[in-house]
Amino acid sequence: METISTTNEQSSNKPADVVVRGNAREFLQEVVSGKHHLRADEPVIYGGTDAAPGPYEYLLTALGVCTSMTIGLYARKKQMPLENITVSLRHSRIHARDCEECETKEGMLHRIDLEIELTGSLTADQHAQLMVIAAKCPVHRTLKSEIDIKLQGAAI
């Protein structure tokens, strides 16, 4: 059971990395991340207006961007002849019993299918190295690890 604290004891004095604001009448949200302004919404079929990407699209974006950046950084450091990186992602839910490599065997699981296309004069060994590095991006590691989300109400 989650508890909601109404004190700010656990918060640091550091400002939030991301602030999301919306109203209770619709799904459309305004997002501020430093100097960047974004929007988020839900598709029409879920009651939104489809005016912006949805939460899972942003989750996939974070993973895809991090994967591409990690591959590119590694290739530059190793002076590999990598030219372009394309990361395509899909989110779905699957029955746990259909996932042979998963620990959970009951209920539904989230699945992210991630396909990576690398272009350039890479050897088979370089391509294989980059595919191993892809799974080491920080966002990938975060999503595969235990995540502790501390939910609290703002002080009134």
Image (cartoon, rainbow, N blue to C red):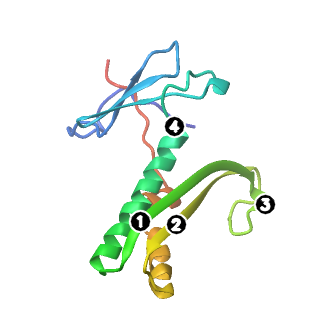
- The residue labelled by disc 1 is 84
User: For the point 41% across and 54% down, which residue is it?
Assistant: 65
Q: Position of residue 130 (x, y in %)?
A: 45, 76
Q: In which quarter of the image is residue 136?
A: bottom left
Could you tell me which quadrant the C terminus lies in? Answer: top left
Question: How far is mark 3 from mark 1, CA to CA?
Answer: 34 Å
Question: How far is mark 2 from mark 4, CA to CA?
Answer: 25 Å
Q: Which of marks 2 and 1 is nearer the N terminus?
A: 1
Estimate how packed mark 2 is, as few (under 14), some (14 to 19) or many (20 or more) residues with alpha carbons within 10 Å. Answer: few
Q: What element carries label 1?
A: strand
Q: Which of marks 4 and 3 is nearer the N terminus?
A: 4
- Foreground mark, 2 or 3? 2
- Foreground mark, 2 or 4? 2
- The residue labelled by disc 3 is 98
Estimate how packed mark 1 is, as few (under 14), some (14 to 19) or many (20 or more) residues with alpha carbons within 10 Å. Answer: few
- Foreground mark, 3 or 1? 1
- Foreground mark, 4 or 3? 4
Give the residue type that dot 1 points to: Asn
Looking at the image, is 144 positioned above or below residue 20?
below
Query: Disc 2, disc 1: CB below 8 Å?
Result: yes
- The residue labelled by disc 4 is 55
Question: How far is mark 1 from mark 4, CA to CA?
Answer: 27 Å
- The residue labelled by disc 2 is 117
Estimate how packed mark 4 is, as few (under 14), some (14 to 19) or many (20 or more) residues with alpha carbons within 10 Å. Answer: few
User: For the point 51% across and 27% down, which residue is it?
Assistant: 41
User: For the point 54% across and 56% down, which residue is it?
Assistant: 88
Q: Position of residue 46 (x, y in %)?
A: 65, 26
Query: Disc 4, disc 3: CB below 8 Å?
Result: no
Give the residue type that dot 4 points to: Pro
Q: Earlier in the sequence, mark 3 or mark 1?
A: 1
Give the residue type that dot 3 points to: Asp
